[in-house]
Each structure stands twice: as C-alpha cells, then as structure tokens.
Amino acid sequence: MLLAVHERCRQSLVAALVLFTFLSVFVTAPAQAAVPPQQPGVTLRVFDVQTGLDKLCTIKSGQTPNVDKLMPVINWTGTADFGINDLFVSEVTGNINITTAGTYQFRLTSDDGSRLRIDGQVVINNDGLHAPTPVTGSIQLSPGYHALRIDHFDNMYDQQVTLEWQPPGASGFVVVPNSVLSTDADVVRVTSPGRKECEGTADSPGDGLPLTSVHPGFTLTNLRPNGFQPQVTGMDWLPDGRLAIATWGGSNNVLGEVYLLSNVTGQTDPSRVQAQRVASDLKEPMGVKYVDGKLYVSEKHRLVELNDTNGDGVTDNYRTVATWPFGGNFHEFAFGLLYKDGFFYANLSVAINYGGATTDPQPAPNRGTTVKIDKATGEVSYIAGGLRTPHGIGWGPEGDIFVTDNQGGWLPANKLVRVKQDRFFNHYTNPAGPFDARPVTAPVLWLPHNEIANSPSNLVMLQQGIFAGQLVYGDVTYGGLQRAYLEKVNDEYQGAVFRMTQGLESGVSRISLGPDGAIYTGGIDGGGNWGQPGKLAYGLQKVTPNGANAFDILAMRAVQGGFELEYTQPLSAETVQNLLAKYQVSQWRYVPTPAYGGPKVDEQTLAVASASVSADRKKVTLQIPGLQAGRVVHVRSPRPFSSESGSSLWSTEAWYTLNSMVGGPATSVTYEAERATLSGGAAVNTNHTGYEGTGFVDGYWNQGAATTFSVNAPTAGTYNVGLRYSNGPDPSAGTKSVSVYVNGTKVRQVRLSSTVTWDNWALQPEQLTLAAGTNSISYRFDAGDVGNVNLDNITVTPATRVQLFNGTNLNAWELRSGGAAPWPIAGGSTETLGGDIRTKQKFGDFKLHVEWYEPNYPPNVTGQARGNSGVYLQERYEVQVLDSYGDTSLANDEAGAIYSKKAPDVNAATAPLTWQTYDITFRAARFDSAGNKTDNARVTVVWNGVTVHNNVEIDGSTGGGDPENASPGSIRLQDHGDAGENPRFRNIWIEPIS
C-alpha cells in the first residue's frame, strides 16, 4: 500500500476497523456436481509483477506463477507466506465443502485489495490501496463442494489475506477451517521466475494477449463422439484414412489405450466418427506410429508392437521391440514417434521432482536424449542430448528432426532445437548424460515462457497453403497452435514465432496433418497448472484451411541492420502513414542456470530508425540500431493496424531469435571449462557463485596447471575466442596472466584484469588462428605468468571483417561534429579535408587495417606540417600519420608513434607517393563495475610489415583524445587542417574481437 496510507492506518487500529463494510445483497450458489480427487487446504499462486498497482488486475493468461503451493488455511500476513515481498498479485483457489444449507457470512481482510468469489459469484469486493481492512458479505450455500477463489494484490509494505466465516447458528467469525477447504490432489506445482504481466488497457486478444478464437483462415470441426473423452498423447494415420490415437491413462498408471477412428477426414461431425479401442493397459504412451501394417507405441519404458493374432481387431500380443533406461519417475516419458528408413525416433525426458526441479541424481542414465531405434533389431542409439521435457518431435526443413523442449532447469525459456548427431542442448544431469561434455548448441527458436509458449508439444511442417514450409506446434498450457517461420543465417536456422489460433476445447498435446490437409489436435490436462485454464481435460478436433486470406504476418526475415516483415495482404494507406511510429521493439537474452526457468536478461527497448514499405505494400523493412546477436527480438505493431481490405491484423506480435546477424559472424559456440581436459593441478570447483554451466576450474595456484579445450572449427581461419574468467584478490589484487596455446604452440601471454571478487566474472577475447576440424586451445600457468585465476568457459566465434571504407563511399562514417562525412573521394581513396571523421559504429577490442598515402611535399614544408593526420583508436589513442620518410630520429610525434606516449621502435616509412599500411591490434582499457580502471589499454602496431609497437601499454588518452571509460569507441581519422595537399586513406577494415 502507499506509504501515506501505511502510516495513517498505523495510527489507530480503531480507524481501520471503522472500514468494515457489510454487503446487503444475498446470493445463492448451488453445489458443484462433481470435483476431481481432493486434498485438504487451498492453492496459493503468486505472480511477481514488479510494478506498482492501485487496484486488482487480471494476470495475462498462460503465465506460470512465481509461487504455487498448498496452504492449510487462508490466514497469511507476510513474505514467508506469500514468497514475495511486494508488488505482486496472488490467486487463491480451492473448494469449500458445505454440510448444512443456509446463509454463510464471510469476512475477508486484506492488504491491499482483494475480492472473494464463490462459484463465480462475487461475495466480497475489498479492492483498492489500503491497510489491513476487513469487509464482510453473505451467500446462500447448499450442501456439497463450492468453488472458492480470492484475487488479491499487494503494492508496498505489509501483506495480508485472511478469510473468516460465520456459518449458520455460529456466534462469531473464525478463520475458515482446514476441515472444509480442499484443492485438487496430486498435482504438479510448476513455478517460473521473472516478471509477470497484468492485462493492459491497450491489450486485446492477439495484440498483447493470447488469441481467444479460431484463425479466420481455418474452420474448426469437433471430432469426439458423444461420451468419448480421450486424453490424446499420440496420432498417426493408416493408409485407409483412419486415425490412430494413443491416450495417456493418467500419471503412474497403466491405463493408456489406442483407438482407431474412422470418418474423421473431410466433411464430418462427431455423430459420424466411430472409435474402436484396439489396445489397452499401456504405460502412459506418448506416441503411436503405423509402419508396415502394424501399430507401434512408445510407452515410458519401451517401444511395443501391437499384434492382433486372432483377428478380432483387438491387440492380444504386445511385443517389446526395444527398451531404454527408466527409473520409475513420474516424468520419464518417451515422446514420439517418428519413423524413417527402418528406424523409429523418440525423445526421453529426464526425471524431475514434483515442483519441476531436475531430480539429482537421476534414477536412470542417458535420459534427456533423442533416441534412434532399429525396427529390425531393437538396438537403441543416442543421437543428441541435453533435453529436459522434449514433448514435441517432428520433421522440419531439409528432412531434419526438430524438437520442442519445456522450460525448467537449464532452460530459462521453452525452445525449439534442430537435432543433429552429437549435439548437446544445455540441460545437464547427474550422472552426466552421453553428450554433456559437448559444446552447447543454441536453439533455433526461443519460445518465451508466458508470452508465446508454456508447455510446447509436438510440431508439424505445413505442406500447402500460404504458410507452406512453416512449422506449427501445439501447447498444453498456453493452448492453441503457434506458427514458426525459419530461415538460414550463416548456415544455421533461426527465425520468428507467431500466434496462430486458439478457440480449441483443450490444451494441445498432439497435432497431426491429415490426408485432407487439416491440422488435427488432441487435448490433455494433467492437473495443477499443466493444462489450459478453463478448458477440458481431453479433446479431439481439427482445423481445416477454408481459403480465406486473413490479414496476418506471413514471415519475418533478418536483413542487414534490422528485419523485413511480410504480410498476407497489402497495408492500408492509413497504416502506411506514420508507419515508423507503429512499431515497438525490444530485445533480451537468456542465461541458463540450474534453477527452474529464468528471467529475461539485459532487456532493452529499441527505437526503430526507419520503416520502408515495398511497392505492393506487403513488406515493411525496419532498420533498428542496437540489435545484438544472441538476443530474442520482440516486435509489436499495436492495433489499429489494418490492411487495404479493412481487416485488422490478426496477431500483432513476433518473437525472432537472432542467433546471428546478417553480415555478422556465425553463431558462437561455448565450451565449458569443467568439461575440458584438466592437468597440472587444475580442478573443478563450485565454491564461488556466478559461473555458467555446472562449475568452474581453479587450481591455477599450481604452476603448470592447464585447461585444454577440444574445439571444432568448420573452416580454417581467424576466430574470436573469449575466455570467461574470475580474478579475485588472492594472493594479491590486480591484473594477472596465463598463456594461451593453440594446437600445442604458445601464441601469447593473456592478461586478465581484476574482477575484484571471486564471484565476479569477466570476458577476455583473443584472436586465434584455427585449422579446419579439431583444434586444442589450452590456457596454462607458465613460468612468467602470475596465474591464480579461475576459468569458466570459452566462447568461439568466427572473426568477422567489417569494411569501413572500400573506396566508393563514406556511409560508415560521420563528421565528429555531426552530419555526413564530407571528405572527397577519388580513385578509390579519400582526402583528409573537411574536419575529423569517425565511424558510426563503436568498438571494444579489435584488429584494424588502414592504408594511407603521403603527397610529395616541397623541402620548405617541414615537421608536423608534412602530411599530418592520425588514426584514433576508440577516439582516445592516436597512432600518428606523417611523412617521416628518411627521418633518422625516433620521436613520439613522428609517423608510427603512439602520439605523445611512445615513439615507434623503428622508422618503417616508405617514400611519399607510395601507399603505406598500419595493422593495429588493440586491447581496450579495462574497468570494474564501479568505473575504476583496472588495466591500461594495449596496442600492437605493424607498420608496412614491421612491428613497431609490441603489446605496448598506453597509460591514458593521447593529445586530442577523448577521456577513457569502459564504453566502446569509434575509429577517428584526423584532418589536421594544414594548407596544401593532404594525406589520403583507402581500404580500411576492422575485425572486432569480442
């Protein structure tokens, strides 16, 4: 509550009690006909909204709570009860069991606002900002169970929710006892960290909120015959058009079944569909496949072939084809099935605890994997690992297997991955899985939890229609179908995900493409918050393309500096007007940790610099400064946003996983130090925080300690290798060092600046030359090194060359004073005339190549007037440009000098009218989080092939340079302003080292 209210209401308890409010309207509620199995108490769910509230709000649907727990009674007065201190929304759900009919009075005390509903009817409204305030209301209740719900929010300071009652004949109010409260029993209480959102005033279905209805381009058909309630976990098609479905049977049961359904294709309805049970008593099947005249089912522990030996249409022989490790955990499913060329494919989920944490240790080995089963021999082989709940498996582009995985430990959000042999997808287990030592493969798509996914299930690739070639996946908890557009950038898939349809009868556990082109959906609800709220616990429907061209986002493609959005219809003239202002963009990244899920990290709002529309008004190209690789980019174009036909945009949002940028390097690969080869006393530890992966490597107090990574390079060349390390104060503070080796050869000593404490981590990038194939990169504590650091991992990225000037334009440059770079260009070079210019892009560490040219000055032009210019690194440190040919003196203001700091070791100048080169390797100064410099900048300058500065320390800005700080900086070229002919520059490029 507000501070003023807090203080005022503390002055007098009597003043608070005056706020009693009595409802004069009596309502009547009949008992529920039936409830699921119950246990005593109520369910408390808390959502961390992290923003101030002054009234009750509606939490956006599909969001997993931060707290979900069973509570005995409703009488809570602090953080220990709610699990969050301030700025949250809580929901209390359960049932109240009435034995005697009559009028019941309730008293709801809360800080801040609250509302009590019984059987959906408001009994007490206690909304607004206030101190603990009791409000009463009455309701007529009949014997039996009645649904109870309390909505509550807390703004600041104290928290309280207390529910009391006065049954008929009672003399006063008491806390509603545990004996009459109940909630659904044996449910999995899944929670998720991070900020949750309330519905906003500008939000509507498909625009800030999940959709609520069926996509206009599809027609919904119900397929369940009367009384048929399948919890569908598998689907496949027989050649005669019948649909085979597997049903779950419930957790830890052996009640799964297989049905064959006829008359489901084409024009049909539930009355025409016929269901025949052909198998039963299966152990939670999660896939079914028809191959060579027989049905195969993936149970929790095996692949089974269904045989009807007596011809009665019912399985009487269940032949085990293959088994896999199974430890008896409720969550050890075998999701499937795919089949191709004699092999089945399935996903094995890991064991988890109730609540979602990965079981440690795992009761069975080699879980969290995609497996391949030989149909003929039953041999099981492992393809990839590091999966948690890989509910979805399907064929995608290029005939590859794509898998959806659910948020949890090591998964800060849901994701879509592309399965290839030996890939590892970041979910670690104990004992280690067969691929845990492999580098992590980035997801094709992040599916942000609570926004576009919650429990994604299987996927299909559409074969026809406007969305042909795109993937569609279902979701058990978020519900409905979502659509994914994929594209290859730097030879790996990435892309965007969009809302597609809702309006189904249940959360979606399985989908399949039918022979009629429809998408068939099977539903399920596993209890707790594993199911779509307000939907059935079972379902079977289909959505059929109807030919309508709804106004939707067709595709989102990465382009240089931004994205291209393609629409299914031309934009209206009204939409095109002021188009730039119609887009909202943000980006963030995720950091996997052992904890369940994870928040968005480094979340930023980005401004759209330009929005250009194509001639047919179907494509919009957005230029967005500040985009970064390794981010999820969210683009929203809120309504009103209409097409030429007057249609409103069906869904206004897209989530693009920008693993790598067009024109940028390929996706980086991270190698964990604890999975590397350790020697010389290097060892794995976990006694400091902040590390990634499952630990870090210490032992670098032992000279000879080494961590050797086995790194695969797709092609020979230069790679940026970033070492994540910690350098604390022991045995002394300050910059320390180790040596880096590639394929057994020492490359250089690596300086590692202080991180102040052992719980802080920093990144030290190096450019290393790798051979194609397998390379070893080793960090060793050699003689002459300081050692005494901890190593976390290395990230390897192909070096990318950015052409700053190629002789045709200065588009990458601007005047230092602002505006376009005016230097004249002729013959492929530019003259230093018109003021200093600098790059628009800013850089940290880098390798820079510059070619420069000096005119032939007459003898009377001397000293600093002979072609004076300079190359400023980060606009802070100048490498001097001057005609110094034949000068036998070495000074810190001659060519090749670090101006005013250090003369070149030799004069490597060539004669005027010749082109000269600088190849500069620059390491920026290092600063701690408080802005204190911990290590000076360093530079190596190779002038015309001669090294004139070798890893030289620069103790501060040079003359005319900007002040030092931790920010990246531009490359600046100087116009010294001298009379006469000027120096020229050409062929300038830079390779960022990051």
Image: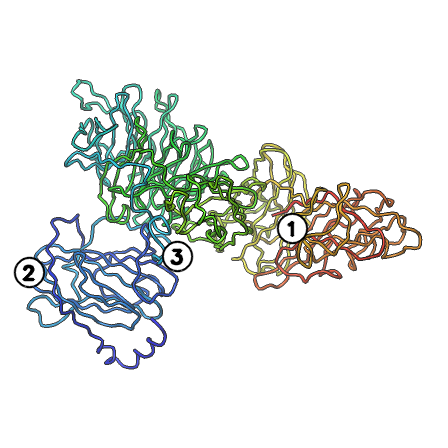
Amino acid type of the residue tagged 3 in the rendering: Arg
Q: Residue 41: horizontal and vertical position, in percent?
A: 20, 57
Q: Is residue 134 visible?
A: yes
Please report whichever mark, 1 or 3, sits nearer to the chain's N-terminal start: 3
Asked if the residue at tag 1 contacts the one at tag 2, i.e. Cβ–Cβ closer than 8 Å, the answer is no
Amino acid type of the residue tagged 1 in the rendering: Asp
- Label 1 packing within 10 angstroms: few (<14), some (14-19), many (20+): many
Q: Nearer the viewer, residue 108 or 424?
A: 108
Please report whichever mark, 3 or 2, sits nearer to the chain's N-terminal start: 2
| Image point (22%, 44%), residue name | 536
Q: Is residue 360 visible?
A: no
Q: Which residue is mark 1?
A: 845
Asked if the residue at tag 3 contacts the one at tag 1, i.e. Cβ–Cβ closer than 8 Å, the answer is no
Q: Nearer the viewer, residue 902 or 199?
A: 199
The quarter holding residue 507 reads top left
> What is the number of callouts on the image?
3
Q: CA distance from mark 3 to mark 2?
A: 43 Å
Q: Is residue 569 left or right of residue 892?
A: left
Q: Which residue is mark 2?
A: 100
Q: CA distance from mark 1 to mark 3?
A: 34 Å
Q: Is residue 695 left or right of residue 296?
A: right
Question: In the image, is residue 249 above or below residue 321?
Answer: below
Q: Which residue is mark 3?
A: 195
Please report whichever mark, 2 or 1, sits nearer to the chain's N-terminal start: 2
Coloring scheme used = rainbow
